[in-house]
Amino acid sequence: MQTIFDNFVAFDLETTGLDRTTDEIIEIGAVRVENGEIKDVFSTLVKPTRPIPTFITTLTGITNEDVRDARGLKDAIDDFAGFIGDSPLWAHNASFDAGFLDTAFIECGKFAPTNQIFDSYRLSKIFIPRLNGLSLGNIAKFFLVEQKRAHRASDDAATLAKIVPRLKIYAARFPEELLDKLVSITGKFDAMLSEAIYNLLEIKRGSASLPDVKSREEMLINLEGIRGEKDDTERRFELSDVLKLFDNDGAIASILPDFKRRDVQLKMAKDVYYAFQQGEFLLIEAGTGTGKSLAYLVPAVLFALSKGERVIVSTNTKNLQEQLFFKDIPTLQQIVPFKSTLVKGRGNYICLERLKRTVEKLNQLTSREAEELAYTLVWAYETRSGDIAENINLSTGRISPLWMHINADTLGCLGHKCPFYDDCFLVKVRNEQKESQIVVVNHSLLLADVAEEFGILGGYSYLIVDEAHNLEKVAANFLGVHIGLRNFNILLGELYKEEPLPRGIIHNISGKLRKDYPEKAEKSIQLLAESSKKILTARRQLRQFFTTLGILLQDEVNWQKKQYSVRLRMLQSDKLHRFIIERTENIKTELLLLSDKLAELVSETKYFEDDILSEEYPELVSAAGKLKDTIVDFLFFRKCSEPEYVFWVETGRSFEDVTLHAAPTNVGELLDKMLYKELETAVFTSATLTVERKFTYIKERLGINRISPDRVSEELLGSPYNFKENLLVLLPVYKRDDEETDDWMAQVALDVSRHFRRGSLFLFTAYNSLSRVHSTLEKELPKEGIAILAQGVSGSRYAISSRFKESRESILLGTNSFWEGADFKGETLEVLYISKLPFAVPTEPYHQAICEKLENEGKNSFLAYILPECILKFRQGLGRLIRHENDVGVAILFDRRVIDKRYSPAILNSLPTMVIPIYSQKELIIRMEGQFR
Ligand code: SF4
């Protein structure tokens, strides 16, 4: 059967830029495919009317010289039109190419082409949802298609011509029912996409030659991680069992070819072994390169197996969580069979029941939701974990309207009554973790579980906290209260929404009762109507409240919309607090009346629970309960009188982001009461736990000083890397008094970049400063072939990190989130600039409240809190530079407070190497040359 996947023209354009109204085509490439085979090729350069920008030449290799004698656009378009005829066309990211093509045809006095144009990017997005990055190159790799020169039109068209038939075979293997649903869903937002999938469906129906549909198990056979069998037999293990695994000829070395015995790793493994044996709280600082995770996993796994216990391992960052679960744990499982589970919050898992209902109610979806549904179905069919992180389409950090309807945190889990109960991902993961020896979580889930009195993980006695320096921050967040318009909007929207179409639990219940029991359910129908009116009123009042609050903030802190987050502290009876009390008076009454109305509705509709409302009734109960809790949280801010809390209002980019916050200031005390009392053993580890080589600060912040000292032990392990030789920290002190700091820093960076052309990271403490340095560098370096990647300008953190890793000589400019967690090895990063010592912003409400508390206790808040926090963060920042034993780098610090102040020794004594003052630019270059020699 011949289709648009077998007979078509694949084409690609290279252009001078992205804007079809101002940029121009410089190359057209096309490949004709007949019966699945390449029959003809079209390729031409086109002479633009302006010079080709440098970055386009860098990307494509097409120079001004190449196009000097090329043909004009009209000639090229005439030939191209003849080549394509009326064939169906394929392009990758077709809207871009089609847009340029339309403009070019019209410019040349022709009608825009009427050929059908299909998009391999969008089709791949649906059928290969787990492929990380849907560039043509990545898709070619996935289908084992050799790609010649990327970003050259004829080569890219040839690559695409080979991908399209493979995409057909791959996609047409999915079940007919799934393809059928996708035809309808995509029809809501993209007719061509729907047409392409309809073709697949026809192929499926009409061809016996296609391979059989693979079962979910068959399709996933290679994706499954290595899992050990459960071992119920209790075994004893000795310290020697732990240590011998780390020998040069031990079991770990037999699996990891580069593994070498490291004394610091052995020492750490020993310490963790004793902590488990003796029921201790162990603090252990271990530098980069220690091999921390295996050092704690080995004794933890052996202990868990021997005692039939679970050990919870908590990390702060996704990177570490993934390294543990997908790398270190599978390695260890090849040596010692054990079970492990990665547990995330409910909202990370898909709810199959909700997905089914969403597909059934296609007509209620907006076109954006329909589009997201199309990008979700294949993944939902394939996935073994149900974890949204696997689905690149929905897990890129933005809020997905569809995901809010289909995740397992949505309202009204049917529990045992659910027809998908046996397949439910959430149920499975919760059961699996009870049977596991190692349970991996992140700090957010760990603390959410503590706040829910262990309602997620169940009781446990053994805990390892990696990246422990972040625990206080996450605890303050999860043990606090946070409420904004968005929380209400989501919840009230689930209950009832009028726009763009009436929908929601109340709408659905009302529809069913009106249809089946118009008389018997008269009172319920009346209550439903009243509730929906009250919901609309509440939404209106809440919007008004948060908008006025935003306007007040604009006046108070000069907050401009679109400006990133600003925080304003709220104290009892101050202007902000009085405003909240006054403006919530009416809303309070409305919300409480709504809550009562819903409670009445819940009791009235219970009669139909086992009848026509078996799906909707649990949702109603859950929504009514959640709304009641949300109202309690909201009204908490009227009091603002809890002595152990700090209250503040935070703005985001819009009024919808204005949020009320309350966080406890006694996190250590709460952790002790709520968590530590339940534990036998806890290990706290990180590369930065000490200040001036002492654990005193972190023990106080995390409440470990409340544990009996005979149960607490400490270990400060160095790094196996040679920081003294490999890391050079330079402090330029030659800024003229009349020079602006940002201009001076930019000038230093310009000179250093031109001289050394090495991968560089510039860490800032304020976005304004980043922005100013960026504008100077951006004017100069790109034209010299050095790319500038700036946070907030060049894309998401993930995108700029990936681009930075790919290009050798670029400079990445980042603020807060790059100070830790960023991992750039080898030549990617060799020069680190630090604009300032990272002292906390003094107006930050949480820091302010902690300082006041310390001052009230008679302590110096600067020395007891602000300075140690700064030192830990500074050490994290410096730690970005040396990530491997062979890494060599130079850090340039622009803040002379590191040597000029009374507190300077505390900072200097905490660093792994000395700081060298530099008196001229020439000296700076000479020093750096010496380091890189
Ligand atoms: S058991 Fe609950 S979370 Fe799981 S699929 Fe059913 S309704 Fe969804």
Image (tube, helix red, strand yellow):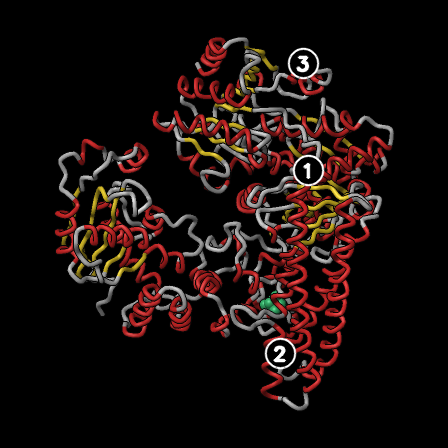
Q: Is mark 2 within 8 Å of ligand 1?
A: no
Q: In this rendered view, identify the residue nearer to me: 129 or 85.
A: 85
Binning the other alpha carbons within 10 Å of mark 2 as few (below 14), some (14 to 19) or many (20 upward) gives many
According to the picture, the residue beneath numbered tag 2 turns out to be 509
Measured as percent of width and height from the top left, residue 921 is found at: 48, 11
According to the picture, the residue beneath numbered tag 1 turns out to be 468
Label 3 element class: helix
Q: Nearer the viewer's eye, disc 3 or disc 1?
A: 3
Measured as percent of width and height from the top left, residue 838 is found at: 64, 28
Q: CA distance from mark 3 to mark 2?
A: 70 Å
Binning the other alpha carbons within 10 Å of mark 3 as few (below 14), some (14 to 19) or many (20 upward) gives few
Q: Which amino acid lies under the numbered mark 1 shown in the image of this protein? A: Ala
Mark 2 touches mark 1? (CB < 8 Å): no
Q: Which mark is residue 900?
A: 3
Residue 468 position by quadrant = top right
Q: CA distance from mark 3 to mark 1?
A: 31 Å
Q: Which mark is residue 401?
A: none
First of labels 3, 2 by sequence position = 2
First of labels 2, 1 by sequence position = 1
- Residue that appears at 58% across and 81% down: 511
Q: In this rendered view, identify the residue nearer to me: 434 or 106.
A: 106
Mark 3 touches mark 2? (CB < 8 Å): no
Measured as percent of width and height from the top left, residue 646 is found at: 77, 43
Q: Which amino acid lies under the numbered mark 3 shown in the image of this protein? A: Asp
